[in-house]
Amino acid sequence: MDIVIANKSHIKYADIICKTITDSAKIRGTGIAKRTPEYIIAKLESNNAVIALEGKRFAGFCYIEAWQHGKFVANSGLIVHPDFRKQGLAKKIKEAIFNYSRKKYPKAKIFGITTGLAVMKINYELGYRPVTFSELTDDEAFWKGCQTCKNYDVLARTGHQMCLCTGMLYDPKQKVKSTTNRKHPYNKKVLQRLKNIKQSIFLKNKKV
C-alpha cells in the first residue's frame, strides 16, 4: 500500500473519491459534507491531498483546506474504500496528511470537526484536543462547506457555535506529549456520551 502526496496524475480517481465520500455518509448515517469532482480535482492539482493506492486501485484519500491566509488548516474528506477498511488504513492516511500539513503550513493551527469516534481517537493521538467552535476558523467559506451536510440546520440554528460534530484542534505552539503521559487520556465512553447528548438535544429541537 502506497500513501503519497496527490498530484495531477491522480485526477482519474476524482469520481471514485466523491462516490466513496457520498456512500460512506449514507452507510454510516453521519454528516459528511459532499464534494464535487471539480473540487477534488482542484485539491489534486494543487498538491493539497494525499491518496492511498494499492497498485492502481484506489484505497483512501484526505485533503487539506487552508483558511485565514494559512492561519488555520483543516484535514478533511478522510475516507477509505470499503475494500480496504478494518486494516488500519484510515489512521495511516490521517497521520500522512497531518505530517504533510505541518510541513507545508508549519505555523498553522490544524483542526477538524467530526462525529466519528474513531477519527476523534486518531486526532487525540496526534495531539489534537477538543475545543469549542469559537476556537476554530471564523472564515465563512469554511462553514458554507457544511451546507451539504444533513446536520447543517443544527449548525445554522446555533450561529455556528455548536453542532453534532466535535471540534478538535492541534496548536503547534503547544507542545503535546505522548498519550501515555497525559493527565486526561482519550476516553471513548465520555465522547460517546457527549455525542449522544448532542443528538438528544439538537435532533429533539429540530422536530419541535
Image (tube, rainbow, N blue to C red):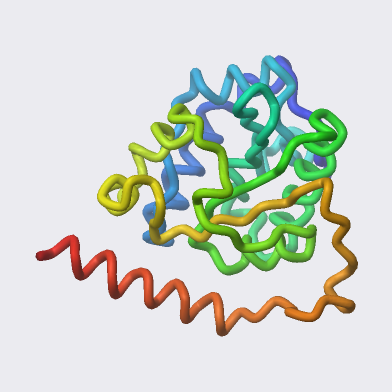
In the rendered image, the vertical position of residue 71 relative to residue 157, given as above or below:
above
> In terms of depth relative to the viewer, which is nearer, 65 or 92?
65
Report the side of 99 relative to 134 (left or right). Answer: right
In the rendered image, the vertical position of residue 107 relative to residue 125, given as above or below:
above
**Residue 19 image position (x, y, % from top left):** 46, 38
**Residue 14 image position (x, y, % from top left):** 56, 26
Which quadrant of the view contains residue 195?
A: bottom left
Q: Residue at x 51, y 60 (%)?
A: 166
Report the side of 17 relative to 75 (left or right). Answer: left
> In terms of depth relative to the viewer, which is nearer, 49 or 134?
134
Q: Quadrant of the C terminus?
A: bottom left
Q: Residue at x 44, y 30 (%)?
A: 140
In the rendered image, the vertical position of residue 127 relative to residue 108, given as above or below:
below
Which quadrant of the view contains residue 99?
A: top right
Q: Residue at x 43, y 61 (%)?
A: 28
In the rendered image, the vertical position of residue 106 relative to residue 23, given as above or below:
above
Q: Residue at x 70, y 43 (%)?
A: 110
**Residue 36 image position (x, y, % from top left):** 44, 26
- Which residue is situated farthest in the bottom direction here? 189
> In terms of depth relative to the viewer, which is nearer, 184 or 195?
184
Mark count: 0
Report the side of 201 relative to 206 (left or right). Answer: right
**Residue 48 image position (x, y, % from top left):** 70, 26
